[in-house]
Image: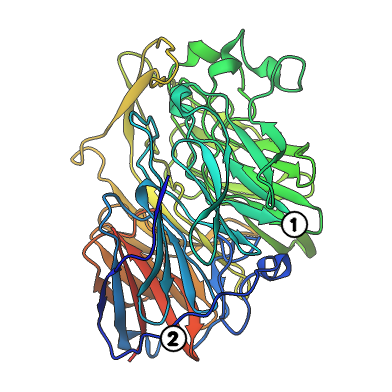
Amino acid sequence: MMRIFPVLAVCFLLAGVTIAQQAPPALVSIQEVAQGLPADGSRWLTFGGNYSNHRHSPLTQITPANVSRLKPLWTFQTATLGNFETTSLVRDNVLYVTGPQNVAWAIDARTGRQIWRYRRELPQGLTACCGLVNRGFGVLGDRLFMTTLDAHLIALDIKTGSVVWDATLEDYKTGHSSTIAPLVVKDKVIVGAAGGEYGIRAFIDAYDAQTGKRAWRFYTIPGPGEPGNNTWAGESWKTGGASVWVTGAYDPEQNLLMYGIGNPGPDYHSESRKGDNLYSNAIVALDADTGKLKWHYQFTPHDVHDWDATEVPILADLPINGETRKVVMFANRNGFYYTLDRTTGKIIVAKPFVITTWAKEIGADGRPVLIPGHTPDEKGEVTCPDLTGGTNFWQPSFDPSTRTFFVNAREVCMTFISWKPTYTPGERFTGGSGQRVKPSESPAWGALRAIDPATAALKWEFKFLSPSTSGILTTASGLLFSGDSDGNLLALDSRSGKLLWRYQMGAPLHGTSPTTYIIDGRQHLLVPAGTTLTAWAIE
């Protein structure tokens, strides 16, 4: 590993600003992390803004009336190959940012000036899928926590970027990796293992924030003698994947962690792993202190279309049928939107939010009612949605004032093909592939959709000619920020879906979304696009 400190940032100042010397940040308390986004906009300390993953800011300086007056203040270019898929953290006027290939920075939020830079020396021959990316830091005390492409969790000193401790999750040579943004709960750092395309047996881990010692592990595929192991025929559980690469949510009242789990492996070949294949394509609720399973719900039993449930869960308390329910909201890659009771995992509502041809509904028993003819074979079969899904890992948002769930949806179909694979440690183990249906036969398009989580009814949509992979930020002033596939940053009225403003960023906001905070009494909008960060404010 190597740290470069200090190094001149590749930074362009686009407005009159003064470079100020940064004072060492005070310790970040777990109370601050748990509070989420404060009304004063002074910090953003978790992946989703708060433990519930609302990604909804209380700030109101930037409004539908003045959003067209946004101007860039500064731009930070990483000079690193790859794209941002990160959520930047901010505290004490400093941004903490992870980038591709496990490079990370501390940046002066006023000016875009680099304070320190960390770069991990990665081994040759990494097998990480899909993209050498990272989705963000966790933070507690004087430490930042980052997962690595070679399947480690590291703690960095928040002041200098130097390594405090380095914990090995698993051997990267077997296909394990990690790109997830850690979630800090109490004194623990929660992470997950990616690499399901390589026949791993994945897990969710908790590590002591001070020492880096592992506190517990939950395997996402139960072993012999454990409940659910009989849902894997023979020894298929050993290479079943079920990886975890998107940050979950935390319910402090119940002390429950809720994470979406990836698809089973091999991805497409049904006969290689007969059974429901728990806990793949499920959401699991774990005791945060012990990692013990409290409940689960499987969205797609025996998935054969690569529909990971590694989407972002959002928590809320909602009035439904005259009763306030504790819910978890989940727009799934399989094309269905779900509202579940987060105390039991039972379905409250489940309806398609995109065109789905593989199942006509979710039955009273919680299982999808399948439409015959949608098991891939060597000849190929056409199914909607495609393997990327009705949505994917990019972040949705939830506005608690209007009780609206926002998601970037995709309308794309695919021909799925499967064949029997041979497992070799560290090599891809998918058992098939897919090819998108010709546009002349089934055009691919997308839409920003606003959904009523009590009923799954569509409130409004804003259509795209081609699907977007951008996340979403909403604000209390009634704004929604996202992006399209052409690299435009978009501002919409979150209550009506009306487009208010756009700006060409030069690259899409792939798998990431803007964040917002206050610096010196002024609301800033931070936009990661391609390998560039741009800070905006009202002129």
Question: Would you name the residue on which mark 2 appears?
Answer: 62
Circle 2: element type: loop
**Residue 204: quadrant of the picture:** top right
Point out residue 490 in the picture as x, y percentages from the top left corner.
33, 71
Q: Is residue 173 visible?
A: yes
Horizontal side, residue 88 vs residue 411: left or right: right
At 42% from the left and 13% from the top, the residue drawn is: 424
Kind of residue indicated by mark 2: Ile
Give the vertical position of 371 relative to 68 (above or below): above
Q: Is residue 267 visible?
A: no
Q: Which residue occupies 64% across, 30% down?
A: 220
Indicate the quadrant containing the C terminus: top left, top right, bottom left or bottom right.
Answer: bottom left
Within 10 Å of the Cα at label 1, are there few (<14), some (14-19), or many (20+) other Cα atoms?
some
Pointer 1 residue: 186
x and y percentages locating residue 1 in the rendered image: 43, 44
Q: Nearer the viewer, mark 2 or mark 1?
A: 1
Residue 268 position in % (x across, y down): 43, 21
Q: Which mark is residue 229?
A: none
Judge the density around disc 2: few (<14), some (14-19), many (≥20) Cα neighbours within 10 Å. Answer: many
For image coordinates 33% across by 37% down, the residue present is 413
